[in-house]
Protein backbone atom coordinates (compact mmCIF):
# COMPACT_ATOMS: atom_id res chain seq x y z
CA UNK A 1 0.00 0.00 0.00
CA UNK A 2 1.34 3.40 -0.98
CA UNK A 3 1.37 5.75 2.03
CA UNK A 4 1.40 9.43 1.13
CA UNK A 5 3.87 11.30 3.34
CA UNK A 6 3.65 15.00 4.06
CA UNK A 7 6.41 17.39 5.05
CA UNK A 8 6.21 19.44 8.22
CA UNK A 9 5.39 22.46 6.09
CA UNK A 10 2.23 20.75 4.80
CA UNK A 11 1.19 20.04 8.38
CA UNK A 12 1.86 23.64 9.33
CA UNK A 13 -0.15 25.01 6.41
CA UNK A 14 -3.09 22.78 7.29
CA UNK A 15 -3.02 24.03 10.88
CA UNK A 16 -2.61 27.66 9.88
CA UNK A 17 -5.54 27.54 7.47
CA UNK A 18 -7.72 26.22 10.28
CA UNK A 19 -6.67 28.89 12.78
CA UNK A 20 -8.32 32.33 12.93
CA UNK A 21 -5.84 35.14 12.27
CA UNK A 22 -6.25 36.45 15.81
CA UNK A 23 -5.26 33.04 17.17
CA UNK A 24 -2.29 32.81 14.81
CA UNK A 25 -0.95 36.10 16.11
CA UNK A 26 -1.24 34.97 19.73
CA UNK A 27 1.02 31.99 19.14
CA UNK A 28 4.74 32.53 19.48
CA UNK A 29 7.69 30.27 20.10
CA UNK A 30 8.00 31.56 23.67
CA UNK A 31 4.41 30.83 24.72
CA UNK A 32 4.79 27.19 25.64
CA UNK A 33 2.33 27.37 28.54
CA UNK A 34 -0.59 28.76 26.54
CA UNK A 35 -3.65 26.79 25.51
CA UNK A 36 -2.66 27.31 21.86
CA UNK A 37 0.71 25.67 22.41
CA UNK A 38 -0.89 22.72 24.19
CA UNK A 39 -3.31 22.24 21.28
CA UNK A 40 -0.40 22.22 18.85
CA UNK A 41 1.55 19.81 21.05
CA UNK A 42 -1.40 17.40 21.19
CA UNK A 43 -1.93 17.65 17.42
CA UNK A 44 1.67 16.76 16.60
CA UNK A 45 1.83 14.06 19.24
CA UNK A 46 -1.11 12.37 17.53
CA UNK A 47 0.61 12.63 14.12
CA UNK A 48 3.85 11.23 15.50
CA UNK A 49 2.02 8.29 17.06
CA UNK A 50 0.61 7.59 13.61
CA UNK A 51 4.16 7.86 12.21
CA UNK A 52 3.10 10.70 9.92
CA UNK A 53 6.15 12.79 10.85
CA UNK A 54 9.76 11.67 10.99
CA UNK A 55 12.82 13.00 12.78
CA UNK A 56 14.37 13.57 9.34
CA UNK A 57 11.53 15.95 8.43
CA UNK A 58 12.02 17.95 11.61
CA UNK A 59 15.78 18.16 11.02
CA UNK A 60 15.24 19.22 7.39
CA UNK A 61 12.84 21.97 8.43
CA UNK A 62 15.31 23.34 10.97
CA UNK A 63 18.09 23.28 8.38
CA UNK A 64 15.89 24.95 5.75
CA UNK A 65 15.01 27.84 8.03
CA UNK A 66 18.44 27.99 9.68
CA UNK A 67 17.14 27.22 13.16
CA UNK A 68 19.79 26.10 15.62
CA UNK A 69 19.72 22.32 15.59
CA UNK A 70 19.57 21.38 19.27
CA UNK A 71 19.89 17.77 20.30
CA UNK A 72 16.48 16.09 20.08
CA UNK A 73 15.26 13.35 22.37
CA UNK A 74 13.64 10.53 20.45
CA UNK A 75 10.51 10.13 22.54
CA UNK A 76 7.15 10.91 20.93
CA UNK A 77 6.47 13.54 23.56
CA UNK A 78 9.76 15.36 22.95
CA UNK A 79 9.33 15.30 19.18
CA UNK A 80 5.76 16.59 19.50
CA UNK A 81 7.00 19.51 21.59
CA UNK A 82 9.72 20.27 19.03
CA UNK A 83 7.12 20.23 16.23
CA UNK A 84 4.92 22.63 18.17
CA UNK A 85 7.88 24.97 18.71
CA UNK A 86 8.67 24.88 15.00
CA UNK A 87 5.08 25.74 14.09
CA UNK A 88 5.24 28.69 16.49
CA UNK A 89 8.41 29.78 14.69
CA UNK A 90 6.70 29.31 11.33
CA UNK A 91 3.77 31.48 12.40
CA UNK A 92 5.61 34.20 14.27
CA UNK A 93 8.75 34.65 12.17
CA UNK A 94 8.35 33.19 8.71
CA UNK A 95 4.94 33.14 7.10
CA UNK A 96 2.58 35.71 8.58
CA UNK A 97 2.62 38.97 6.60
CA UNK A 98 3.76 41.98 8.62
CA UNK A 99 0.80 44.37 8.47
CA UNK A 100 3.01 47.28 9.54
CA UNK A 101 4.78 47.05 6.18
CA UNK A 102 1.64 47.90 4.23
CA UNK A 103 -0.71 45.95 1.98
CA UNK A 104 0.50 42.41 1.34
CA UNK A 105 0.94 41.85 -2.41
CA UNK A 106 2.22 38.28 -2.48
CA UNK A 107 5.27 36.04 -2.22
CA UNK A 108 7.54 34.78 -4.97
CA UNK A 109 10.83 33.00 -5.65
CA UNK A 110 13.51 35.16 -7.25
CA UNK A 111 14.88 34.37 -10.70
CA UNK A 112 18.50 34.69 -11.83
CA UNK A 113 20.06 34.23 -8.41
CA UNK A 114 22.80 32.11 -10.01
CA UNK A 115 24.00 35.14 -11.97
CA UNK A 116 24.29 37.48 -8.97
CA UNK A 117 27.89 38.35 -8.13
CA UNK A 118 29.23 36.76 -4.91
CA UNK A 119 25.86 35.10 -4.27
CA UNK A 120 27.53 32.33 -2.25
CA UNK A 121 29.02 34.77 0.24
CA UNK A 122 25.88 36.93 0.31
CA UNK A 123 23.60 33.94 0.87
CA UNK A 124 25.22 33.07 4.19
CA UNK A 125 24.67 36.59 5.50
CA UNK A 126 20.90 36.45 4.86
CA UNK A 127 18.24 35.63 7.44
CA UNK A 128 14.52 34.92 7.28
CA UNK A 129 12.74 38.26 7.78
CA UNK A 130 15.53 40.44 6.35
CA UNK A 131 14.27 43.51 4.45
CA UNK A 132 15.19 43.71 0.76
CA UNK A 133 14.68 46.36 -1.93
CA UNK A 134 12.85 46.20 -5.26
CA UNK A 135 14.65 48.29 -7.87
CA UNK A 136 13.19 49.13 -11.29
CA UNK A 137 15.58 48.51 -14.21
CA UNK A 138 14.00 50.19 -17.25
CA UNK A 139 17.25 50.01 -19.21
CA UNK A 140 17.71 46.27 -18.74
CA UNK A 141 18.64 44.93 -22.22
CA UNK A 142 16.89 41.61 -21.65
CA UNK A 143 13.58 42.84 -20.20
CA UNK A 144 12.26 46.40 -20.18
CA UNK A 145 9.92 45.45 -17.29
CA UNK A 146 12.77 44.13 -15.12
CA UNK A 147 12.57 44.49 -11.34
CA UNK A 148 15.80 43.76 -9.51
CA UNK A 149 15.90 42.66 -5.86
CA UNK A 150 18.84 43.70 -3.68
CA UNK A 151 19.85 43.72 -0.04
CA UNK A 152 19.60 47.04 1.81
CA UNK A 153 23.34 47.43 1.09
CA UNK A 154 22.62 47.21 -2.65
CA UNK A 155 23.91 43.66 -3.16
CA UNK A 156 22.06 41.98 -6.03
CA UNK A 157 20.07 38.86 -5.12
CA UNK A 158 18.12 38.28 -8.33
CA UNK A 159 15.03 39.44 -10.21
CA UNK A 160 11.27 39.14 -10.06
CA UNK A 161 10.52 36.42 -12.67
CA UNK A 162 9.55 37.89 -16.06
CA UNK A 163 6.14 36.19 -16.03
CA UNK A 164 5.26 38.11 -12.84
CA UNK A 165 6.98 41.47 -13.24
CA UNK A 166 4.46 43.38 -15.39
CA UNK A 167 2.20 44.36 -12.46
CA UNK A 168 5.08 45.15 -10.09
CA UNK A 169 7.01 47.17 -12.70
CA UNK A 170 3.87 49.22 -13.43
CA UNK A 171 3.38 49.89 -9.72
CA UNK A 172 6.96 51.11 -9.39
CA UNK A 173 6.64 53.22 -12.55
CA UNK A 174 3.53 54.89 -11.09
CA UNK A 175 5.43 55.76 -7.93
CA UNK A 176 3.97 53.09 -5.64
CA UNK A 177 6.44 52.20 -2.89
CA UNK A 178 7.11 48.47 -2.67
CA UNK A 179 8.81 46.72 0.24
CA UNK A 180 9.87 43.11 0.62
CA UNK A 181 11.16 40.66 3.22
CA UNK A 182 12.92 37.34 2.82
CA UNK A 183 10.49 34.50 3.43
CA UNK A 184 12.50 31.40 2.57
CA UNK A 185 16.17 30.52 1.98
CA UNK A 186 17.36 27.27 0.48
CA UNK A 187 20.48 25.91 -1.16
CA UNK A 188 20.25 22.64 -3.08
CA UNK A 189 21.52 20.97 -6.24
CA UNK A 190 19.71 23.61 -8.29
CA UNK A 191 21.52 26.46 -6.54
CA UNK A 192 20.26 29.30 -4.36
CA UNK A 193 16.50 29.68 -3.81
CA UNK A 194 15.25 32.90 -2.22
CA UNK A 195 11.55 33.60 -1.65
CA UNK A 196 10.33 37.05 -0.69
CA UNK A 197 7.10 38.58 0.65
CA UNK A 198 6.14 41.81 -1.12
CA UNK A 199 4.17 44.74 0.33
CA UNK A 200 2.81 47.97 -1.17
Image: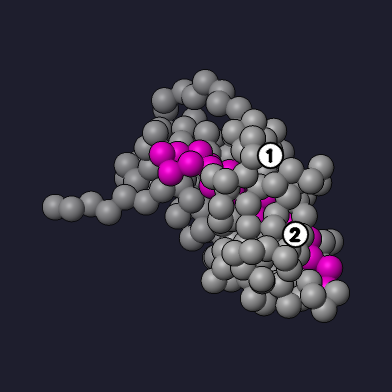
Q: Nearer the viewer, residue 169 or 50?
A: 169
Please identify the residue farthest to the top as the structure is shown.
71
Mark seen at residue 40 = none
Q: Is residue 69 left or right of residue 106?
A: left
Position of residue 44 relative to residue 25, above or below, is above
Instruction: Point out the tag, 1 or 2, that comes first from the N-terminus.
Output: 1
Position of residue 124 relative to residue 135, above or below, is above
Picture quadrant of residue 106: bottom right
Q: Is residue 7 left or right of residue 171?
A: left
Question: Where is mark 2, residue-wise?
Answer: 134
Q: Position of residue 83 (x, y in %)?
A: 51, 40
Q: Position of residue 199 (x, y in %)?
A: 75, 65
Picture quadrant of residue 185: top right
Quarter of the figure with the C terminus = bottom right
Q: Nearer the viewer, residue 144 or 72?
A: 144
- The colour scheme applied to this rendered structure is one colour
Amino acid sequence: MLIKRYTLENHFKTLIEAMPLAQQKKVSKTQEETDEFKELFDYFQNLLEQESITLEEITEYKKLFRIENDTLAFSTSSLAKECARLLCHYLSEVYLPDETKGRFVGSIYLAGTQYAANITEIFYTLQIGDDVKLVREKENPHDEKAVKVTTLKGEKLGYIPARHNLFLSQMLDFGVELFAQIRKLKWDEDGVAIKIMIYA
